[in-house]
Image (cartoon, rainbow, N blue to C red):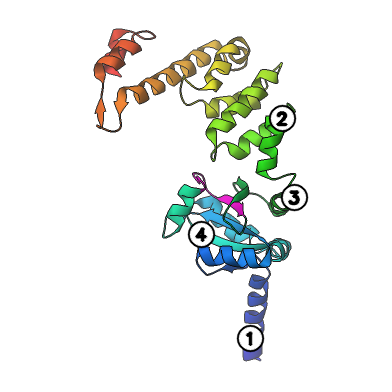
Amino acid sequence: MKKIAIFSALFIGAFAFAQGIKFEESNFATVLAKAKKENKLVFIDAYTTWCGPCKLMAKNVFPQKTVGDYYNANFVNAKIDMEKGEGIEIAKKYNVKAFPTYLFVDGNGELVHRTLGYVEENDFIQFAKDAGDPSKRLTALKQKFENGEKDPEFLKNLAGLTMYSDPEFSGKVMERYFNSKTELDRNDIQMLLSVIQTSDSPMYKVFQSKKAEISNMITPEKYEAIDKSIKISSLFKKSYNADTKSWNDNYFLTEAQKFMSKEEAEKR
């Protein structure tokens, strides 16, 4: 009876595991060849070993039967560490900078859709359906933007999809989004502040143009503090020469004194 119980437990465990996504164990070139032969897209789970959400996806979502049924039927699936082996070059090729990122490519290795982050079962299946629908793929969404689409929800979603893979394009999307908004809410301000990296950013111009509205939401003092932080961050980047690994102190001090005292500039 013990042996039967052990065998049953092993069988049930193996069956449960088999219900989830089946990932190929071959190299990327072989995966692409298989996808081309079967006329399928490749789904790539682009992960790293230190990424917490990646581990949660592997534990909670990938093993689900509904997820496995859909992904195994419609894709050739690959799980690739972006910091090891051929994953390093794949990360460069597809500009993967946030984890987990989910890539959908055709048999020629051309990217057709992508998304990222920890998501629940239903949303994860919807991503797959979007990848299979040419009208919902990232390339189609970008074309829709180029054709002049101004729907706020569309623009917000597209900006999120391209934020890490194509920040320049994402900036254009956000610029249109904020320019079309007559009134900002707290989520808008949070999104705006999360993408402003330098004072040269198009989003910084939006930040300046919406000063009164943002100040009313977060207080004028906080606005000024954030504005100063952005300017300092920009100045640090411009004062550092990455090629020679040297700082231009005179440039920093001169420019910094345009918005802070000499003493503070020297301290910085």
Q: Tell whether label 1 touches label 4 (CB within 8 Å).
A: no
Q: Tell whether label 3 touches label 1 (CB within 8 Å).
A: no
Mark 4 and mark 2: span between their CA atoms? Answer: 35 Å
Give the residue type that dot 1 points to. Answer: Phe
Residue 183 on image: x %, y %: 70, 17
Residue 169 on image: x %, y %: 58, 32
**56 left or right, relative to 74:** left
Q: Closer to the observer: label 1 or label 2?
A: 2
Residue 154 on image: x %, y %: 72, 33
Numbered tag placed on residue 7 in the rendering: 1
Which mark sits nearer the N-terminus, 4 or 2? 4
Mark 2 and mark 3: span between their CA atoms? Answer: 19 Å
Q: Closer to the observer: label 4 or label 3?
A: 3
**254 left or right, relative to 232:** left
**25 left or right, relative to 248:** right
Q: Quadrant of residue 79?
A: bottom right
Residue 9 on image: x %, y %: 64, 80
Classed neighbour count for the residue bearing mark 2: other residues with Cα under 10 Å, few (<14), some (14–19), many (≥20): few
Q: Which residue is mark 4?
A: 80
Q: Which residue is mark 3?
A: 133
Q: Tell whether label 3 touches label 4 (CB within 8 Å).
A: no
Mark 1 and mark 3: span between their CA atoms? Answer: 43 Å
Q: Which residue is mark 2?
A: 147
